[in-house]
Image (cartoon, helix red, strand yellow):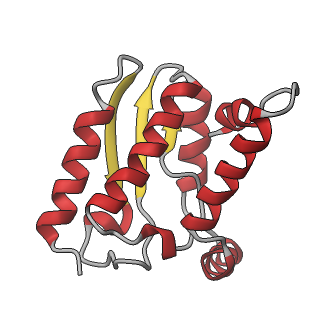
Amino acid sequence: MVSETDLNDFMNEFKEKVEKYSSVDNVEFFGSIKTSDWKVGKSDIDIKVFGNNIPGKTKRKIRQLLRVLNKKYNLKLGKARCCHPTPFFLDSPQRRQGFNQMMKGHSPVVQIARQVLKENAPTYEEVWQMEENVKKSEEGYPIPKLSKLFDKFS
């Protein structure tokens, strides 16, 4: 069980460490983590990282920090369904606009699709393992790095 204090400590530590990067303006948490609805091992974590053209290397470090703090605070994210990128990197006007459009009111059809996704999306652990597998396969081949392509869309 994660106490409310531990959850707040997690959010404070994540925010403090991420906001030290020069390309990051601020970090905001939203969704169930800001309410009493968040559940260990079940809920995802909704995070927005605002900045200006955050480099891919920095994004990878931030995603890695999420894993480290997940373990430190025993959030059990690995078991939760990963329905979207965590965090959302809103580091250009286009990304901010796209995110705002995505978050606008949802039709009943979109609500049903979201529920199906929540029930069938891979877990964070599965997503993290896929990222590791891509990283390992890239190390041995002289091909364009998929992780750099991924960074452009994160």
Please state the total of marks drawn on the protein image: 0
Q: Residue furthest left?
A: 5
Q: Residue at x 71, y 76 (%)?
A: 109
Q: Is residue 109 left or right of residue 93?
A: right
Judge by depth and name the residue closer to the eye, 118 or 134. 134
Judge by depth and name the residue closer to the eye, 147 or 140. 140
Viewer can see residue 90: no
Q: Residue furthest front?
A: 140
Q: Position of residue 147 (x, y in %)?
A: 70, 36
Q: Residue at x 29, y 30 (%)?
A: 19
Q: Is residue 61 left or right of residue 149?
A: left
Q: Position of residue 77 (x, y in %)?
A: 44, 68
Q: Is residue 55 above or below residue 141?
A: above
Viewer can see residue 113: yes
Q: Position of residue 118 (x, y in %)?
A: 60, 76
The quarter of the rendered structure image containing the C terminus is top right
- Which quarter of the picture shows residue 30? bottom left
- Which quarter of the picture shows residue 122? bottom right
Judge by depth and name the residue closer to the eye, 91 or 55. 55
Q: Is residue 106 left or right of residue 5?
A: right
Q: Residue at x 37, y 51 (%)?
A: 68
Q: Position of residue 115 (x, y in %)?
A: 62, 80
The quarter of the rendered structure image containing the N terminus is bottom left
